Image: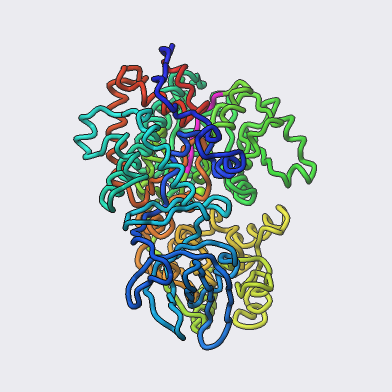
Amino acid sequence: MSSPDPTPPSVPGPQVPIESLNGIGPTRAKHFHAIGINTLANLLDYFPRTYQYESAEKTIADLLTDQIQTTRGEVVAVDYLGVRPRARFEATLDDGTDKLALVFFNGSYLRNKINPGMILRVQGLVKTFRNLPQMANPKWHLIDAESERIAESRFRPIYPATAKLSSDTIQRVVDEHLSAALPAIQEWFPQIVLDQRGLLPRREAYRAIHQPANEREAQQARRRIVYDELMLMQLGLGVSKRLRDGRLTAPVLRADKLLDERIRKRFPFPLTDAQQGSIWEILKDLRSSHPMNRLLQGDVGSGKTVVALYAMLVAVANKMQAALLAPTEVLAEQHFLTISNFLKDSGVRIGLYTSRTKREGRGAGLKDLADGKIHIAIGTQALLQKDISFANLGLVVVDEQHKLGVMQRATLKSKGFSPHYLVMTATPIPRTLALSYFADFDLSTIDHLPPGRLPIKTKWLRSQQAIQAYDYIREQVGLGRQAYIVLPQIEDDGISDNKSVKTEFDRLSKGPLSGLRLAALHGQMSTEEKQSTMLAFRDRQTDVLIATTVIEVGIDVPNASVILIDNADRFGLSQLHQLRGRVGRGKDLSSCLLISDPPSDVAEQRLRAMTQTTDGFEIAEMDLQLRGPGEFFGTRQHGLPEFKMADVTQELEMLGQAREDALAMLAEDPRLIMPEHRELRKALGEQFGETLPLAQVG
Ligand code: ADP
Ligand code: MG
């Protein structure tokens, strides 16, 4: 068990509540609580957003013309001039010595930000206009009346502020308590690590992040704090992996040669080497009583579903149930169709569980699930909710990047299951990021596509060239092929000028595509309607499917050779790549046509990237660069800390270092019980809380 952990009785302890600090009354304390600052430690962790050089303040009367000057005053008048000659926001400052005019060109956003009665500090070039000193587009920020004048030039932090709590106030409180609080900040890492990585000592970093002498110090401080964040996460993930591996017992699932042959017979094609390799890795995991925790990644169309199905059939053969979770109901339905097709005339029973099947009174399936009569359950994450019971759940497969949250694991455990766990992702995750976000996962990669796939030609057209696209679709349909047309929304919303499935369906059937057999597909249709529409398309009863992104994943019609994506700038890069993966599945050369007049540089870069590469990894890297990881993953990662400082897209190198260091540390001291790791262990406990019951590791 853990050793007692006395905090040195230095004053003030980091856990001192903010309201007991000098200068913080109940009202101000409330404002601090509102931004998550409850203790002195929280305050130290509230980092500046940026820094600013500030020159000494002068009174308005003393301002020098044609020089950059700093001053302050009360806002006594504001005005917004919407039109002539250039839209501008004006304010007048008064400090008792004189008045200063401020002009902000295109400053309409300031209309509800700067109001009379406020006190502003401003910095800018002073001119004289109609006998009054004036600053155009000055740097400004709100200060409170108590804020002292700046006597000398200085480099100062700017904290994320709120309407109730200015950066100045925060800075004042930090300044007052920093020196007293610093001694409580203990070093986490051995000196050798700091030397090797060129990092400031922790205490020094905390001082410098709040009170840097200059830009360089601020940067060094930032580096250290970023490293700490990344390292803590890597350690947390590493420890939690050990913890899970050590404590849970999953069912042992075996496959012999006979079973292997039986499963393979279900597929109308031989598995690729890459699929074989992944299956081999999965089988090794399933044979063990440690729960598998594996990420299966592979580009669109690389054949992940088949690999997952193989694993599910192994579970079923071992008299266990398997669950397949999709991110949306539509995708769950599509998996249901695909898998039912592979398992036609077999004894395996498959159940689909969505809110729709529930509504449509097919809830009887729930009893079969609880009785073990259903072998493979397909649904959304709701499938793991409390009111749904399994007889003997042995494997959970999750499609598309959603991690099984801590809560869901706990729910499963409370039902007596600790299943094996496989996550599929079609957005190839750049390796460094995979290592950080999925550090507690083992990784299998399907790195090549099934044979015979031809590269997809991608062309970007402006909207006035759209007719070329429709002509091409006609030509392809004439050759017996089929096409998809994808639009960003189902109906016109009257707000944006996005095209919609319903309007385009009407327009195209009367105009550019008249005479062809068109069908519409979107999420408002019932399961049956969608199924029959998709089946009709698959059976070549329709030529062109006009759809929303419901077709993004799962639709599989090798005869389709064109996908036209209209308003293409409305889609993310990875999404475009996914959509493109709907074609190129047959023997024929396929095309992806993007129609867009891109509204922004980023949109243009996305479209350009699409025309330049079909490599999913390259696309993913670019997407990450363009968007950042939060959006990239679509969902917040459960159980992972939020970074205050680190930006993993920019700090890949440091992320790699932190991972290396974390692994080395855990190799030497798996439970972090060595005396020199005491502080770190404590920090981990605080950071991960109940997610990571370190006490149970020790
Ligand atoms: P993913 O889920 O990785 O995007 P799928 O599992 O949907 O890919 O497979 C894409 C298509 O390739 C499907 O039509 C599937 O039946 C087919 N497929 C899968 N594995 C093979 C293979 N080894 N040989 C030929 N076709 C395959
Ligand atoms: Mg798939």
Compare residues 588 and 88 and report the one nearer the observer: 88
What predominant SS class does the magenta segment belong to?
strand
Compare residues 174 and 305 and report the one nearer the observer: 174
Where does the image place residue 372, in percent across and percent down from the top left?
67, 26
Q: How many marks?
A: 0
- Quadrant in which the N terminus is drawn: top left
Whether residue 56 appears in this view of the structure is yes
View extreme (front): residue: 97
Where does the image place residue 398, in percent across and percent down from the top left?
53, 40
* Relative to 662, residue 496 above or below: below
**Start and end of the magenta stretch?**
418-424
Where does the image place residue 383, in percent across and percent down from the top left?
65, 37
Compare residues 631 and 254 and report the one nearer the observer: 631
At 42% from the left and 73% from the top, the residue drawn is 459
Q: Quadrant of residue 79?
A: bottom right
Is 274 on the left or on the right of 78, as rendered? left
Where does the image place residue 588, in percent across and percent down from the top left?
43, 65
Is 411 on the left or on the right of 576, as rendered? right
At 43% from the left and 18% from the top, the residue drawn is 697
At 38% from the left and 65% from the top, the residue drawn is 58
* Relative to 160, residue 77 above or below: below
Q: Quadrant of residue 441?
A: top left
Whether residue 610 appears in this view of the structure is no
Is 132 on the left or on the right of 651, as rendered? right
View extreme (right): residue: 361
* Relative to 480, residue 614 above or below: above
Give yes or no for residue 606 being in the magenta stretch: no
- Quadrant in which the C terminus is drawn: top left
